Amino acid sequence: MTTTPALLETNSGDTARSARRPLRVVGVSGSLHAPSKTTTLVRAVLDEVAGRSAVETRLVEIAEIGPALAGALTRSALPAEVEDALRAIETADLLVVASPVYRASYTGLFKHLFDFVEQYALVGQPVLLAATGGGDRHALIIDHQLRPLFGFFQALTLPLGVYASAGDFEGAALREGPVRERVAQAVARALPLIEQSAQQRTSEYVSNW
């Protein structure tokens, strides 16, 4: 977990300044394996956010919680570690979600995890979408699979996602070069929206219509 102190002007419109709590940033890797290229990509995004703003980061890995998650049919049947992960997801200021491409979509356990997320918990919550796959043609997963999923939750899916193919990795490590530039660009474009969203109260009308 990373925490960096920072100051931000209050919303009252006056010149008073108060300590701002760090942004809660939660990464979710849908990979079923460790080590994982997908988890490496999520970590790279989390590190980039932490290098630009005051944050507390947490990484939820399906490879770790999957065995405890897989057999549950209701949220009440989930073990404490999975419930804790869900609460972190639901209360984050920013979600960074990624999945490897599996049968033209995200992994089943990734979807199973989000099936337990409360329907209106992510309304207006910024979500940075990312994915990994064997070749560039799989990049469509971001707009054709991930974006509709979080659209259902009425989340704020950020304009730029990050896709990394096999050529962007050396083993399980992310290469320097274009993929790192894509990560930096996605975070730079996202931060103003993230910080503004963290200061807004969600409309009850929007969350329940």
Image (cartoon, rainbow, N blue to C red):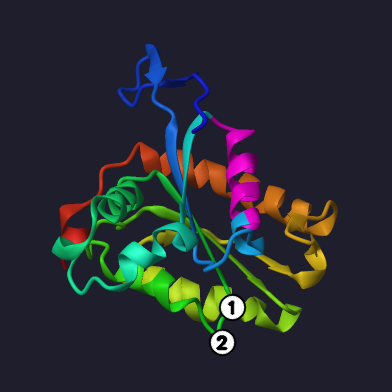
Question: Cβ–Cβ below 8 Å for labels 2 and 1?
Answer: yes
Left or right side of 28 for 102: right
Q: In which quarter of the image is the C terminus?
A: bottom left
Q: Which of 122 and 39 is in front in this view?
A: 39
Q: Where is residue 165 in the image (x, y as percent from the top left)?
A: 74, 71
Q: Which residue: 37% across, 66% down? A: 67
Q: Give residue 47's mark.
A: none
| Residue pointed to by mark 2 | 104
| Residues shaded magenta | 40-53
At label 1, counting other C-alpha atoms closer than 10 Å, the crowd grade (few under 14, some 14-19, many 20 or more) is many
Figure quadrant of residue 103: bottom right
Q: Which residue lies furthest to the right in this view?
A: 177
Q: What element carries label 1?
A: loop
Q: Nearer the viewer, residue 188 or 69?
A: 69
The single residue placed furthest to the bottom in the displayed view is: 103
Query: Considering only vertical position in the picture, is 20 above or below 195?
Result: above
Image coordinates of residue 15 in percent, x first then y, are 40, 13
